[in-house]
């Protein structure tokens, strides 16, 4: 059993404050809790996917000093990563949080919430208590969620959409683009901590889940919401904390790796948010074959039923249209999106138009720094704004 190190009183107080903030978010939602409290206008909206899921979408149409007119403003859609939701882009102060920075720079900002998150648990005919509601994997995020978001924003604004994804939010857009989706609505895509190949992953918790197919096993037992409650939570916690090298004192670090440049308070906020709102059945998107594939149901007979072939279909990154403007932001200390894995992805894109692909490598950055670091506004978002301006 991993030991729980003692924490300084100050950090404990900060975490208590973070928990209170999360409770407010629970009660009031993202707009009222995290946007309007900072003096920005915010709209709560809903989008329905082709397969019937009702997704939450927040819109920040203007900055503090801008008027509320969205005419001529370019829309930007922000897509969060695993264990997060649209609040991920709002955790830092306004001058350090990407959503607020974009709004203040004159963009029309839209915050996506993937199916299963608190804002996106509706369905045309299913309840979250119905096991059928959870019969999806991350493939459906690429096939249904992203197209629904892009089409809605495009219809509302009449303009193509800039996109920023973090972690899983990069994998879903890469998958969609490789299948020629979004081409009529996408203006450019920025990929922060890009996740595609995960052969060099070093975070022990995710390694263990991949090796043991733990996600599949948990789902087979009937678990849908994660983390579970009651006795099931205790059993799962005991299992995870018994993995050698896993430090259960900070679940976010256990999942993503170190947070060398991110605020301690925001770490607490993010960890608390993970605990409360991770209601997604993404399954194990770590492929053991060294390829990027659709969800692997492990048993060939099930894969055959789902895909009409024994192994899951491959997402071919080389099929991404070569003229799509792409921005890659990745770090040297990222335990999930290892540099060598990112380079493997970039190698797949070696024939991409050279003037349409931008790399932003930051040696000291880890996985969460791209959305949580206090200096990301200068190291990441300034180059990102330049990229948007060129496209």
Image (spheres, helix red, strand yellow):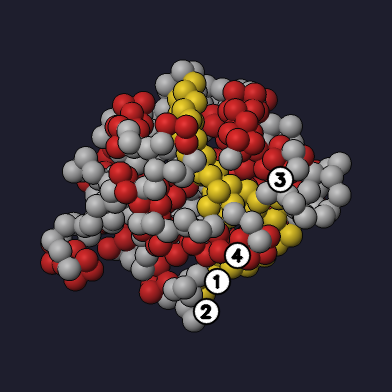
From the viewer's perspective, is 240 left or right of 391? Answer: left
Nearest to viewer (mark 4 / mark 2): 4
Q: Which residue is mark 4?
A: 152
Relative to residue 384, is residue 60 drawn left or right?
right
Q: Is residue 110 above or below residue 355?
A: below
Residue at figure coordinates x 47%, y 78% from the top left: 126
Query: Is tag 1's residue or tag 4's residue first in the polypeptide sequence?
Result: 1
Label whose residue precedes the other's in the sequence (4 or 2): 2
Dot in front, 1 or 3: 3
- Element assignment for label 2: loop
Q: Are marks 4 and 2 in contact (CB under 8 Å)?
A: no
From the viewer's perspective, is the residue at label 2 or at label 1 nearer? 1
Mark closer to the chain start, 4 or 3: 3
Distance between mark 2 and mark 1 Cα atoms:
8 Å
User: Quick one: label 4, few (<14), some, or many (20+) residues within 10 Å?
Assistant: some
- Of 150 and 308, the residue lying toward us: 150
User: Residue sitting at 39 percent across and 43 percent down?
Assistant: 322
- List the residue tagged with mark 3: 107
Nearer to the camera, 218 or 177: 177
Looking at the image, is mark 1 or mark 4 nearer the viewer? 4
Q: Which residue is mark 2?
A: 124
Quadrant where the N terminus sits is: top left
* Residue corresponding to mark 1: 48
Compute the Cα span from label 2 to label 3: 32 Å
Residue 354 or residue 193, whichever sits in front = 354
- The residue drawn where x is 44% and y is 50% is 173
Q: Do the residues under discs 2 and 1 have CB atoms within 8 angstroms?
A: yes
Q: Are marks 4 and 3 in contact (CB under 8 Å)?
A: no
């Amino acid at each position: 059993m991993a030991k729980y190190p003692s924490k300084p009183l100050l950090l404990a107080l900060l975490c208590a404050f973070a928990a209170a903030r999360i409770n407010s978010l629970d009660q009031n939602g993202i707009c009222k809790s995290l946007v309007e409290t900072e003096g920005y206008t915010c709209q709560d909206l809903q989008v329905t996917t082709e397969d019937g899921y009702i997704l939450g979408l927040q819109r920040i149409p203007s900055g503090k000093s801008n008027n509320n007119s969205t005419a001529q403003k370019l829309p930007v859609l922000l897509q969060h990563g695993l264990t997060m939701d649209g609040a991920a882009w709002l955790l830092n102060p306004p001058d350090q949080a990407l959503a607020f920075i974009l709004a203040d720079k004159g963009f029309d900002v839209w915050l996506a919430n993937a199916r299963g998150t608190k804002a996106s648990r509706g369905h045309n005919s299913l309840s979250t208590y119905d096991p059928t509601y959870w019969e999806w994997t991350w493939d459906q995020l690429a096939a249904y969620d992203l197209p629904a978001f892009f089409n809605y924003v495009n219809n509302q604004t009449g303009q193509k959409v800039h996109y920023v994804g973090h972690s899983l939010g990069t994998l879903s857009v890469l998958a969609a683009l490789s299948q020629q989706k979004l081409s009529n609505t996408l203006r450019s895509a920025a990929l922060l901590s890009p996740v595609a190949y995960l052969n060099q992953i070093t975070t022990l918790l995710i390694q263990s889940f991949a090796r043991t197919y733990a996600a599949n096993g948990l789902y087979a037992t009937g678990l849908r919401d994660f983390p579970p409650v009651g006795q099931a939570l205790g059993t799962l916690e005991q299992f995870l904390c018994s993995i050698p090298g896993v430090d259960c004192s900070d679940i976010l670090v256990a999942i993503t790796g170190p947070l060398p440049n991110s605020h301690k308070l925001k770490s607490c906020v993010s960890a608390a948010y993970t605990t409360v709102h991770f209601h997604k059945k993404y399954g194990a998107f770590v492929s053991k074959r060294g390829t990027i594939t659709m969800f692997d149901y492990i048993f060939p007979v099930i894969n055959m039923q789902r895909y009409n072939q024994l192994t899951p279909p491959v997402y071919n990154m080389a099929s991404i249209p070569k003229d799509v403007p792409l921005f890659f932001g990745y770090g040297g200390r990222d335990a999930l999106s290892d540099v060598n894995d990112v380079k493997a992805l970039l190698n797949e894109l070696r024939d991409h138009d050279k003037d349409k692909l931008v790399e932003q490598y930051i040696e000291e950055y880890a996985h969460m720094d791209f959305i949580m670091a206090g200096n990301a506004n200068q190291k990441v978002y300034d180059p990102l704004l330049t990229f948007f301006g060129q496209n």
